[in-house]
Image (cartoon, rainbow, N blue to C red):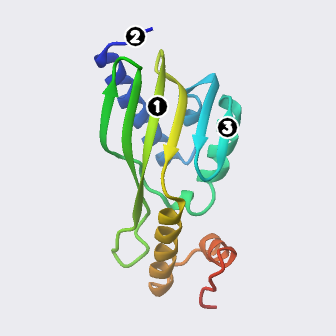
Amino acid sequence: MPWSRAELDEAFAHYQRTVGRCVELGDWDGFADLFTEDATYVEHAFGHFDGREAIRTWVTRTMSAFPGNRMTEFPANWYVIDEDRGWVICEIDNPMEDPGDGSRHAAANITILHYAGDNLWSREEDAYNPMNFLATAKKWCRAAEAAGNLPEDAREWLSKMGDRPAA
């Protein structure tokens, strides 16, 4: 079923507002509720998730642990609408909070959303280089450590990644 450009644009704006609220509240249920019950989520580092509840479980776990819990927003740097397919394709920035020294740490991904109508999406795919995100998170940890602000969850994550933070 074709959707108008205006509907796709508004649905994407709703998606972005919902993500912003999820970040603000630290509650990712609203994100999962953006998807149809039988939606597919393809995440290149974490795998495929089939169904809204699998998406909910994954996003809640991912965004409540480091480094996801240190990301402050997910703005679209740009987006395009494919009216014929009902898709929105965008670049999403993933900035992390200030580590304590005023530096900025972020990595971007390409997101492809398939619209299903009624502000719901039937598929999302996030494409990116996981090594860029790993390097960004490690640099953030080093900056936070140097500023005396490295949180314990980040210290544990860094250690699991094979780096040893200062004691």
Q: Secondary structure at mark 3?
A: strand
Residue 1, compared with residue 63, is above or below; it is above
Q: Which residue is mark 2?
A: 2
Residue 50, compared with residue 100, is above or below; it is above
Tell which circle, 1 or 2, labels the residue nearer the N-terminal end: 2
Q: Is residue 9 left or right of residue 46?
A: left
The Cα atoms of the two marked residues, 3 and 2, are separated by 26 Å
- Pick out the residue farthest to the top: 1
Tell which of 11 and 5 is nearer to you. Answer: 5
Tell me which residue sits at (59%, 90%) in the image: 166
Tell me which residue sits at (41%, 48%) in the image: 74
Give amino acid for label 2.
Pro
Q: Which residue is mark 1?
A: 113
Give amino acid for label 1.
Leu
Tell me which residue sits at (62%, 31%) in the image: 40
Give amino acid for label 3.
Phe
Residue 122: x and y, percent? Answer: 55, 24
Q: Which residue is mark 3?
A: 49
Tell which of 115 and 24 is nearer to you. Answer: 115
Residue 90: x and y, percent? Answer: 37, 40
